[in-house]
Image (tube, rainbow, N blue to C red):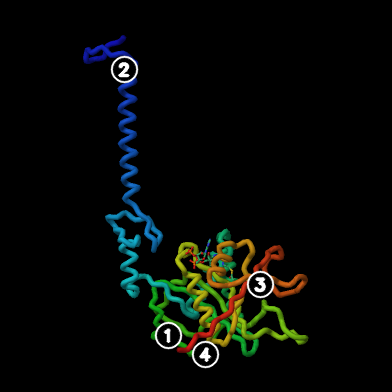
Amino acid sequence: MRSIPLGIAVSPTSINNKLNFNFKKQQKQQQQQQQQQQQSFFNCSSCRVSHEPSLSPLSKSGVCRASQVVELFPTVSPEIVVREARLEDCWEVAETHCSSFFPDYSFPLDFVLRIDRLVGMLSGFSIPNGCKRTCLVAVVGNSGDVSFCFGSEDFKIGGFDGKFSLNRGYVTGILTVDTVADFLPRKGPLRQRRTGIAYISNVAVRERYRRKGIAKRLIAKAEAQARSWGCRAIALHCDLNNPGATKLYKGQGFKCIKVPEGANWPQPRTSPDMKFNFMMKLLKTPTTT
Ligand SMILES: CC(=O)SCCNC(=O)CCNC(=O)[C@H](O)C(C)(C)COP(=O)(O)OP(=O)(O)OC[C@H]1O[C@@H](n2cnc3c(N)ncnc32)[C@H](O)[C@@H]1OP(=O)(O)O
């Protein structure tokens, strides 16, 4: 037994019990507050962001008000536009390519890599006679309006449109589509290039813009481009160890093609231990009603 200043005699065990009780009560209150806060946040099914309702309340459809505004007023929101790459995009195209395929490189190697890519793209002037190549970009912060473009319609440098515009956007995703058929098996004894099959390569989306449907839109645009070139199918090679990309292409209707045993089909020139899935999709011609 010991006395405390107020003159009330209290046993040490009874003080301990009281302190324990108060501590538990405080803990419970804190837990309840935390739970209430967590419940008041919600995940928007459109922009996939966790919102506080006071900032962007949830609608009945599970989409935040901000996303609904984006849908209602696409021209005032940062809309993604997919278009042909122009000369002014080439640095950002190189940057998107390198940051997506070589994310672990740091300065100065990453800078050298971008310069190398840029030179590679721009010096790819010559494509075989009758073949086509286009680099597509998904840009944000631009209406896609080409009314302020300089340069001629037909002038092309590598896969780039020779036009130059002042109202450029920020490149978030890239894709190249061509009819060069470098990576398709040749045909006949003369080993001629295949015709009628477009080929997709260099698909990349900047990391912070991923899982927003940008790659899907680039692929859809590439298919439309291939159809306009008169192609009946579109093909690509996808790294066997890239399940995300494989899922993307399968979701877009591409099928894995089994390469015949022993066939020496051409493959993209990367590291020798990389294995590829050859994937292909037949292009439906638009039906006329
Ligand atoms: C032919 C070639 O060029 S192959 C090379 C592919 N490029 C790369 O690997 C570079 C690094 N990766 C990237 O740049 C991107 O992750 C890409 C290009 C693979 C995908 O771009 P995104 O814009 O994120 O794809 P998008 O949002 O259109 O995805 C569409 C669907 O593909 C599938 N998908 C895409 N990425 C992934 C992933 N990482 N994991 C699982 N599924 C995925 C999903 O089904 C997705 O639909 P969902 O989001 O509704 O589930």
Dot 3 or dot 2, earlier in sequence: 2
Q: Residue at x 48, y 78 (%)?
A: 88
Residue 259, position as x, y percentages in the image = 71, 72
- Please identify, in this view, whether the residue under mark 1 or under mark 3 is nearer the observer: 3
- Please identify, in this view, whether the residue under mark 4 or under mark 2 is nearer the observer: 2
Q: Residue at x 69, y 84 (%)?
A: 193
Amino acid beneath label 2 = Ser
Residue 284, position as x, y percentages in the image = 54, 82
Residue 2, position as x, y percentages in the image = 30, 10
- Checking the image for residue 154, the label placed there is 4
Q: Residue furthest left?
A: 6
Image quadrant where residue 11 sits: top left
Dot 4 or dot 1, earlier in sequence: 1
- Checking the image for residue 64, the label placed there is none
Image quadrant where residue 34 sits: top left
Q: Is residue 108 visible?
A: no
Label 3 sits on residue: 257
Label 2 sits on residue: 14
**Mark pair 4, 2: CA separation:** 91 Å
